[in-house]
Image: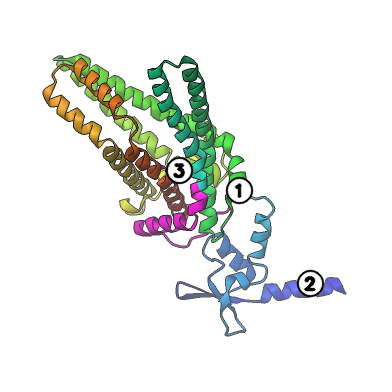
Amino acid sequence: MLDCECMMLDDQEMTEEWIVRVQGKEYGPANIDTLREWKREGRLLPENEARNMGADLWSTAAAIPGLFEAATSGANAGSPIEPPLQTQHRTFGQILAETFQIYRKGFFQFLGLTLLVLLPSVCSQAMTALIQKAQGSGGDLRVVAVGLFSFFMLMLSVAMWPVYLAGVQVLTVEIANRRRPGLVVALNEAVRYWPRVAALCIFVYGVFLLLLLFGLAIAGISLAAGSSLLLILFALALLILQVWMFGRFFVNVLFWQQFAVLENAAFIDSLRESRYLARSGRDLPWFERPLWRGAFIASLWFAFVLVIALVSEWTTLHHYFNQLTTTQDPQALLQQLTEAQQARGFDISAFVLNILQKILQPLVGIAFVVLYLDSKVHPER
């Protein structure tokens, strides 16, 4: 008897049809299987309006029995992080607006993540200043002790960096899903990705460091070239090659953090999928493609960092240009700049600006997560 009742309920669920309203347009009637397919495709969200064919009262798709409950129970069973479903592309202005909105909603959680890497770095800088003071007073043992502590703080900051990166991804998606996770919950989730994110950090930052060293070598060749036209042309060719390699690698690793954390992809898969997504959207206008949007977001952040650096070091730069116009001897110029830097001592304004930059740094990570979610609206692109 119970089996018959269950079969009747299943048949009733299969025969029920629903009308859904998305952005003012009505779709249907559709049965539960069709609705589930629309949900998988990202065309139907829990907050979309819906009503039964036999009723006039509108509700939400979340109230349809058997449609979204399965996804919720699956998420509680330890499944990977589920990004929010989107049905249309955002404009670039909407991406920036959502970035600041997410940062505002989770400010204290993001601040807690920032302190993981900021506090050890601040301690390291403070200990370095103490080393310089101790060297001036001749305290050898204090120099060794403070130096070891400073090195330990620096290594702790480096070790916390992968947790910080993964934590920004986790918090952003949770807040975008209209959930407010605590910092401890986000940290527990982020720590699981530490080995993979740390390995990818070593690879990505290591390649960028090698490219930077390559650029310094080119600069050395240019200085050594003197009046040799052949060496100057050779250095110019190397510079073009270095810029091309830097740009190409930058494009390929635009979204490695998102795939490593949000998609739980392996080391190679994160890099491969990042390259594929960055080069997708060829049927879109160039300013709507993930590549150009990501490059513009990174450019905005680099410009902000440059402004902070120029403001904090303005006194040193002003002194440098003054000495450059009056001193012709490079060694004398370097000595004068070193003495001026030592005489300057601790600069509170530069310190505050550096802290401000670190506090705002999660914004660039949030922006790339929002861009990633936007770029996944139509994966085929």
Q: Is residue 340 magenta?
A: no
Q: Nearer the viewer, mark 1 or mark 2?
A: 1
Q: Which residue is mark 2?
A: 7
Q: Which residue type does callout 3 highlight?
A: Phe
User: For this view, does 326 lie left or right of residue 363?
Assistant: left
Residue 231 visible here? no
- Say which of 130 and 269 sits in front: 130
Which label's residue is closer to the chain start, 3 or 2?
Answer: 2
Tell which circle, 1 or 2, labels the residue nearer the N-terminal end.
2
Residues at marks 1 and 2, CA–CA distance in whole angstroms: 45 Å
On screen, residue 1 versus residue 345, left or right, reads: right
Q: Quick one: which residue is furthest to the right in this view?
A: 1
Q: Is residue 165 above or below residue 317?
A: below
**Tag 3 or tag 1, which sits nearer the N-term?**
1
Q: Amino acid at mark 2?
A: Met
Q: Nearer the viewer, residue 3 or 305?
A: 305
* Residue 260 pos. (x, y %): 53, 41
Which residues are drawn in magenta? 82-111
Return the residue at label 3: 255
* Mark 1, residue position: 184
Q: Looking at the picture, how far across and down is residue 200, in whole percent?
A: 51, 33
